[in-house]
Amino acid sequence: MSSTEERAGNRAARTSWWRRLTGDKVKALLSLGVVLGVGAVGTMAAWTDNATATSTFSTGNVQIRLTDNNVQAYGFTTLSMTNMAPGYSKASVLKVKNTGSLDFGYTISAAATDSGNVAGLGAGLRVKITADTTVSGSGNAITCSGTALTGANGVAPAAVNAAARNLVGTTGNETLCFQVSLPTDASTQLQSASTSIVFTFTATNL
């Protein structure tokens, strides 16, 4: 082999080696570019959105009132009676109203407070409550018609415990009849005695 042929062979070998080397580098760089490209896509920010649901809350109220004047403390003078004697009775009607926003059931209780030097009239009187809207009789014998409420049928004031009655919120109302009497067998010791009766109306929301 001549020197010219030998040099040509060496150049061909070097060219082949360089092509293989540069080809491998190109492939490596291209592979790296693919990897970098995938990484870049993975770190892009995602678009988001949201929605909300809001609820509000408030409370109602329980409010029981008496008469068309919507009073909380009523001077029930139309039921008062003086100069009583055995067998006398007095009756009067009273409107009960629900002026609050919530439906309620209400009960009635009573308490008597004696005054003066003679005690016992509060325990000696008898109370009757009905759902009647008018009274009957006249003079010293005014009474309530209709069926007495459970727990308020001719009992002493302290024993009054009328069963719950329901009234709807805002507009509910009813008229009751209250009767107080001195039994015909009342003790003679009750002469010149006096007492006051407080009726309490307790409402509880339903």
Image: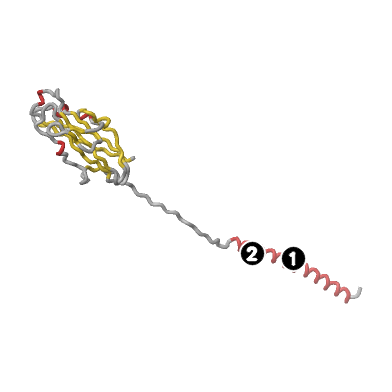
Q: Nearer the viewer, residue 58 or 71?
A: 71
Please, what secondary structure does the residue beneath circle 2 have?
Answer: helix
Residue at 12 percent of width and 23 percent of height: 187
Q: Which of 101 and 167 is in front in this view?
A: 167
Q: Which of 158 and 52 is in front in this view?
A: 158
Which residue is outermost to the right?
1
The image quarter containing residue 44 is bottom right
User: What label sits on residue 176 in the rendered view?
Assistant: none
The mark that comes first in sequence, 2 or 1, is 1
Where does residue 92 sit, x and y in percent of width and height? 18, 37
Where does residue 148 sit, x and y in percent of width and height? 25, 31
Q: Please, is residue 65 above or below residue 197 in the view?
A: below
* Amino acid type, mark 1: Asp
Q: Residues within 10 Å of mark 1 (few under 14, many from 20)?
A: few
Q: Which of 145 and 105 is in front in this view?
A: 145
Which residue is outermost to the front?
137
| Position of residue 25 in the picture relative to residue 204 (left or right) | right
Q: Please, is residue 56 above or below residue 172 in the view?
A: below
Residue position for label 1: 24
| Position of residue 54 in the picture relative to residue 41 (left or right) | left
Which is more foreground, mark 2 or mark 1? 2
Please, what secondary structure does the residue beneath circle 1 have?
Answer: helix
Residue at 29 percent of width and 43 percent of height: 172
* Amino acid type, mark 2: Gly
The image quarter containing residue 66 is top left
Disc 2 + disc 1, Cβ < 8 Å = no
Where does residue 89 sit, x and y in percent of width and height? 15, 31
Residue at 16 percent of width and 33 percent of height: 137
Which residue is outermost to the bottom?
4
User: What label sits on residue 37 in the rendered view?
Assistant: 2
